[in-house]
Amino acid sequence: MNTLLSRLPALPDLRLPRGRRARMLRRCLAAALLLAGLLVLLLPPSARGAPATSTVVSARDLPAGSVLRAADVRTVALPDALRPSGALSASDAAVGRLLSGAARAGEPITDVRLLGNNLPVTGEPGTVTVAVRLADAAVAELLQPGQRVDVVAGADTTNSASVLARGATVVTVRRSDDAGNRALGPPQKGPLVLLALPMQGATQVAASSLERPVTVTLR
């Protein structure tokens, strides 16, 4: 008795020659291994079985003297074998702290790269940041971010030496801009120093630094 199946056209023979079958199997196996390798690389270290710890890293390139904001850092799972000693584990430990040196995007933030919590933050009420060029470049070489200094104006033809501000905080020191300026004209004063100080004394410091030689005394 004729059946529905018997009425269908005969299917072509899909059997491959032995040599072609072997090559196809090898290609499928290679593709499967490649896919498995890619999946392993995309998995976090903890999923791959490697011990990993949450680590704070910079979210972008950051200049020296930056006061870290929440958007400046992020946390990643970093293998313990690659995690530097003293690396922070939580973003809260970095936010509001001053970065002592420049950091590249993705660089782990360690405790020695940050200065104390008592540093004034840009935008803090009653505190502003003033840019000052020191009269003596050698003094600027002694300064480090977070250091406390007194700002002193030197004597000139009409004024005697005087203290302009006490307890200013060094935010950062720009030591690299003088080299490019030498070819453009006479050498300038010492490197540019950013100082955080109370608002009531900032105007006097900024104005005096334009008219009189300014230096700092270290505390």
Image (spheres, rainbow, N blue to C red):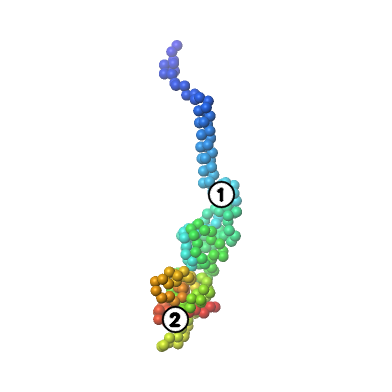
x and y percentages locating residue 70 in the rendered image? 47, 61
User: In front: mark 1 or mark 2?
Assistant: 2
x and y percentages locating residue 211 in the rendered image? 40, 81
Residue in view at x 53 percent, y 35 percent:
29
Residue where numbered disc 2 is placed: 213
Which secondary structure, mark 1? loop
Q: Residues within 10 Å of mark 2 (few under 14, many from 20)?
A: some
Residue in view at x 53 percent, y 59 percent:
108
Quadrant of the rendered structure where residue 200 is? bottom left
Foreground of the two, 6 or 214: 214
Q: Residues within 10 Å of mark 1 (few under 14, many from 20)?
A: some
Residue in view at x 43 percent, y 18 percent:
10
Residue 159 showing in the rendered view: yes
x and y percentages locating residue 138 in the rendered image? 51, 76
Residue where numbered disc 1 is placed: 45
Residue type pointed to by label 2: Pro
For the residues bearing labels 1 and 2, Cβ distance under 8 angstroms: no
Sequence-wise, which precedes: disc 1 or disc 2?
1
Residue 204 showing in the rendered view: no
- Quadrant of image for the C terminus: bottom right
Residue type pointed to by label 1: Pro
